[in-house]
Image (cartoon, rainbow, N blue to C red):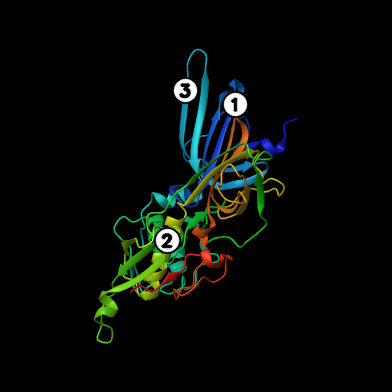
Amino acid sequence: MPDPDLICEVRTNGGTYRDWINVAVEQNYLSEGWIRSFRLVCAEPSAVANFRLKPGDRVDIALAGQVVIKEGYIRDRQAAYDGNRHAVQVVGYGKAGIITEASIDGGTGQYRGYKLDAIANSVLKPYGLSFKVQNGAEGWDAPFPNVMVRYGETPFDLISRLCKQRNLFFYADAAGNVMAGPKSAGGMVTFTEGENILSANCQLRHLAVEALVSGSQMSGSDSLFGKKVSEIQAKATVTGGTPGTKRKVLAEMPLDQKGTQLRTNWEAAALQAMALQLQLTYQGWLKPGVGGLWDPSDGVTVKSPMLFPTETGEQELKVAGYAYTQDPNGGTTTTLDLVNKLAWQQRKGDATKNDGFYDLGNSAAQPEAAT
């Protein structure tokens, strides 16, 4: 009897499909892969003959009995055969995939004095989706004075633009709802060289700059004018950057001082994530010793002197993405994309100090007001 922890099911109104020779389900917090996507190949003669999945069908994808995509879409179906071979491949994404392609349509296209979550939930409502912030940086919930929907802008485009201004990365959950901010700290999974790591590839990068400076402007008024609205700047330092170097960034929309600081901190986090990038593959789909499937920002400890040129050879990292795969040659595996946990460091909205989300000691990157 097949091991239930190794089975991928595609559940539809017309039945459940299990006869896959290739499986790939992926998601990545820090890239365009923030939505959950899948690619499945069926090649058994009996299975192909009864294969009725087609583009537009709604499906649930379950791995090891746990739903990883609920009410997703099949986007593409490709069938091929010759005298010796035959196969059908279906490709699709989670329910949130639609908000990356359809433009915002409805309302006035203007939001005055609304918070990020209110705006996001407004544009997601027509698709039966919601937006939620978890562990957001202080100040994320400050209202935007004026947000204009740009012509042709999708809900994804708008949410992405606004999340940058509030120092938030986001991803889609199994149901397609948009989750912004890192999860609360939970149980840490440990991977150890020579024990439960099939393969690993680690890139350490020297960051070119140690400081980021963002500039913005606001609309003036009789009571607010001059440099206070025309020359708004904020600064954040980057751990490991070359001393004395800086990068300047122009905010995508008008921001006040606190908003400009949050925008700067987002840029610093994105840059900090590049300092350490590790791809790690292990056997199976479930978390070793813990069970369950992965979510972006889950914590991981990796013990591998071969990967890390440090005295301990150990690092605490965060999950930026995952890829669950299964094929006849490689078996059933999970590949994690892991990054420096400094990328998720929470910082005070007043730009003075770390709020203690991580105990980083004196090595933490500390944002500060620009001079």
* Residue 84 screen position, x and y as percent: 52, 13
Residue placed under numbered mark 3 in the picture = 80
Q: Is residue 220 left or right of residue 284?
A: left
Question: Can you name the residue that lies furthest to the bottom here?
Answer: 223
Q: Secondary structure at mark 2?
A: helix
Please name which of the two marks, 3 or 1, marks the residue nearer to the observer. Answer: 1
Q: Which mark is residue 125?
A: none
Name the quarter where the C terminus is drawn.
bottom left
Q: Is residue 101 above or below residue 253?
A: above
Whether residue 98 is visible here, answered yes or no, is yes
Tell me which numbered mark, 1 or 2, is placed earlier along the sequence: 2
In percent of the image, x 42 and y 68: which residue is there?
Answer: 262
Q: Residue at x 52, y 17 (%)?
A: 85
Could you classify mark 3 by the number of other residues whose Cα lies within 10 Å: few (under 14), some (14-19), or many (20 or more)?
Answer: few
Read off the residue under disc 1.
329
Give the number of the disc on residue 268: 2
* Residue 27 in the image, given as x and y percentages of width and height: 52, 46
Q: Secondary structure at mark 1?
A: loop
Horizontal side, residue 330 vs residue 55: left or right: right
Task: From the top left corner, tell me how far across and down residue 137 is, in percent.
Answer: 50, 69
The x, y position of residue 283, in whole percent, is 65, 37
Name the residue rendered at 43%, 52% in the picture: 99
Q: Quadrant of the N terminus?
A: top right
Q: Amino acid at mark 1?
A: Asn
- Distance between the alpha carbons at the discs numbered 1 and 2: 40 Å
**Residue with the most extreme right position:** 1
Q: Is residue 256 above or below residue 317?
A: below
Pair 1/2: label in front: 2
Q: Nearer the viewer, residue 196 or 169?
A: 196
